[in-house]
Image (tube, rainbow, N blue to C red):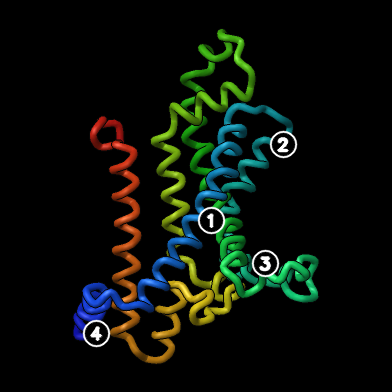
């Protein structure tokens, strides 16, 4: 319990003193994670909706693979992205390895299947309800997808938040492709891993509490902006 209390005090002290390193690392964590969530949502949400309304030969196998990809091992993703972006890899000429961009790419690969799968499950139920109506209106496939995405937006927010929750706590992949470089690619999770390795458990716990508080704050902000509780539909 002593280390936990010391961690709480360390986290509180970092916050009230507006520690410059903490602010820099926190802003970098938000930049990497929110960018990855935005890109993954732009890919995963329409794909999940398309998968709900489209019928094709290997649809069930595609859904099974998508669900399986939700459990992608982050370390394996990090290794693959590392090999692709390394100097000898096909994208090595871009010079992206050990940059925030490489971390964003790894996170997008990890959370896109999660967002798409949750979106598919939500839209599938909505599609069963809207099926006859949208077909009777002779809507195009794209119009159906847009309608389902809009009317299912609250459930889709949950999908994006699930992706955010996984991305903000990710450490394995971004450690491999980011390198945990001070003032360049260090984020909250890699900083926690570093301090734990150094034996400074109080500071590691303090950073952990800051990370949890940040995740809760972002979730509350999104719920407030979307006014889900006010309309009683959450």
User: Residue at the top extreme?
Assistant: 136
Residue 101 visible in image: yes
Question: Which is more N-terminal, label 1 or label 4?
Answer: 4
Q: Are marks 1 and 2 in contact (CB under 8 Å)?
A: no
Q: Residue at x 36, y 75 (%)?
A: 22
Alpha carbons under labels 4 and 1: distance apart: 33 Å
User: How far across and how far down the image is residue 37, in percent?
Assistant: 50, 52
Q: CA distance from mark 3 to mark 1?
A: 15 Å
Q: Looking at the image, which residue is at 73% across and 74% down? A: 86
Closer to the eye: label 3 or 2? 3
Q: Residue at x 46, y 47 (%)?
A: 160
Q: Secondary structure at mark 4?
A: helix
- What residue is pinned by disc 3? 81
- State which mark lies toward you, 4 or 1: 1
Q: Which image quarter is the N terminus in?
A: bottom left
Can the viewer see residue 4? no
Mark 4 surroundings: few (<14), some (14-19) or many (≥20) residues within 10 A: some
Q: Earlier in the sequence, mark 3 or mark 1?
A: 1
In this picture, residue 224 sits left or right of residue 100: left
- Residue at 44% from the left image edge and 55% from the top image edge: 164
Sequence order check, earlier mark of 1 and 2: 1
Q: Which residue is mark 1?
A: 36
- How far apart are the two marked residues, 1 and 2, measured between alpha carbons? 29 Å
* Residue under pointer 2: 58
Q: Earlier in the sequence, mark 3 or mark 4?
A: 4
Residue corresponding to mark 4: 3
């Amino acid at each position: 319990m002593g280390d936990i209390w010391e961690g709480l005090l360390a986290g509180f002290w970092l916050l009230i003193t507006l520690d410059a390193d903490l602010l820099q690392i926190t802003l970098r964590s938000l930049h990497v994670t929110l960018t990855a969530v935005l890109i993954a949502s732009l890919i995963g949400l329409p794909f999940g909706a398309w998968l709900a309304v489209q019928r094709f030969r290997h649809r069930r196998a595609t859904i099974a693979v998508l669900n399986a990809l939700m459990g992608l091992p982050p370390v394996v993703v990090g290794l693959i992205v590392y090999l692709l972006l390394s100097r000898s890899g096909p994208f090595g000429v871009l010079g992206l390895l050990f940059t925030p961009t490489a971390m964003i790419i790894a996170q997008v690969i990890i959370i896109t299947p999660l967002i798409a799968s949750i979106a598919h499950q939500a839209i599938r139920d909505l599609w069963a309800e809207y099926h006859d109506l949208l077909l009777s209106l002779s809507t195009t496939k794209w119009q159906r997808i847009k309608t389902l995405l809009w009317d299912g937006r609250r459930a889709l927010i949950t999908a994006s938040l699930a992706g955010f929750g996984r991305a903000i706590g990710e450490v394995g992949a971004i450690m491999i492709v980011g390198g945990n470089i001070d003032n360049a690619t260090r984020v909250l999770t890699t900083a926690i891993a570093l301090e734990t390795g150094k034996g400074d458990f109080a500071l590691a716990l303090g950073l952990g509490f800051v990370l949890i508080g940040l995740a809760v704050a972002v979730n509350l902000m999104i719920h407030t902006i979307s006014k889900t509780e006010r309309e009683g539909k959450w």
